[in-house]
Image: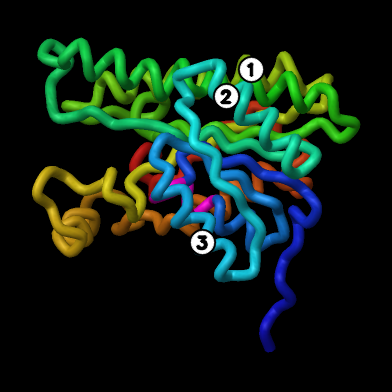
Amino acid sequence: MSSAPRTRFAGRTALVTGGGSGLGRAMALAFAAEGANVVVAGRTEGALKETVGLIADAGGTAVAIPADVSRSADLSALVEATVERFGSLDVAVNNAGVLRAGQPVAELPEEDWRTMLDINVTGVLLALQAEVRQMRTQPGGGTIVNVSSNLGPHTSLPGTIGYGATKAAVSALTRGAAIENIKDGVRINAVSPGSADTTMSLRQGESPAERTERMKNATPLGRVSTTEEVAAAVLYLASDESAPVVGADLVIDGGAAA
């Protein structure tokens, strides 16, 4: 016998940055499937519209709003447009991020470093500021989930030191912001995925099948996480089921950092 559909986010509005592909798209679809009005944001309007189309095809409600998370004006406008469209901002997932890898730290191009800082760190900070300002005005507050990584806060790999440093900063931002804002009704946590079924986990020139073989011995679990599995963890942290969870960093990496 099939179980009834879950509706944990019925009547709520969820904003997902980096919602045009990969983990962000999976999160947007998952929130919509549980009743949320979803706003997908990012820099590539065509990809955002594809996500919205998938949600609409499944009977959900979503809109696409292009935004560059490294620009404070874009994020303020994004939150304002979200509230204007749906009346509130109840959940925010700060997922937008970039990976520039392959070079040892001594040879990391300054441009790559600054790009990762702008998107992965400043982007999360600016998003938090805009989201918290809105959520503090709402009687029900809100929940925020930042997407960090197992690389940086929990483990390291050669060629990813710069990326890991930015994600360690995301984890630190999460803990500090969580403590500062919980008394105002804004609950903040993070997830730290490892290798997931996205293009970001493919090495240069590697096929998905080759990645599958590599992962058999790369982690105790022996495989990448599915995007749906990571999305399920995000939805848990955003839901009332995790009400006492504040400032946590949930690692989803098949035991790689254990």
- Element class at badge 2: helix
Residue ID at (68%, 43%): 238
Q: CA–CA distance between discs 1 and 3?
A: 29 Å
Q: Which quarter of the figure is the N terminus placed in? A: bottom right
Residue 71 lies left or right of residue 207; in this view the side is: right
Q: Hey, which residue is sitting farthest bottom in the picture?
A: 1
Q: Which mark is residue 129?
A: 1
- Element class at badge 1: helix
Residue 114 lies left or right of residue 173; in this view the side is: left
Three-letter code for the amino acid on which mark 1 is drawn: Gln
Q: CA–CA distance between discs 3 and 2?
A: 23 Å
Residue 23, given in percent of the width and then of the height, sits at 44, 48
Residue 171, given in percent of the width and then of the height, sits at 50, 23
Q: Is residue 223 magenta?
A: no
Q: Which mark is residue 34?
A: none
The first of marks 1 and 2 along the sequence is: 2
Q: Quadrant of residue 105?
A: top left
Q: Which residue is mark 2?
A: 75
Three-letter code for the amino acid on which mark 3 is drawn: Gly
The first of marks 3 and 2 along the sequence is: 3
Q: Which residue is mark 3?
A: 53
**Circle 3: is it few (<14), some (14-19), or many (20+) Cα within 10 Å?**
some
Residue nearer the viewer, 194 or 138: 138
Residue 165, given in percent of the width and then of the height, sits at 35, 18
**Circle 2: is it few (<14), some (14-19), or many (20+) Cα within 10 Å?**
many
The first of marks 1 and 3 along the sequence is: 3
Q: Main secondary structure of the magenta part?
A: helix
Q: Which quarter of the figure is the C terminus placed in? A: top left
Residue 254 lies left or right of residue 54; in this view the side is: left
Mark 1 and mark 2 in contact? Answer it, CB < 8 Å.
yes
- From which residue to which does the magenta span run? 20-27
Q: CA–CA distance between discs 1 and 2?
A: 9 Å
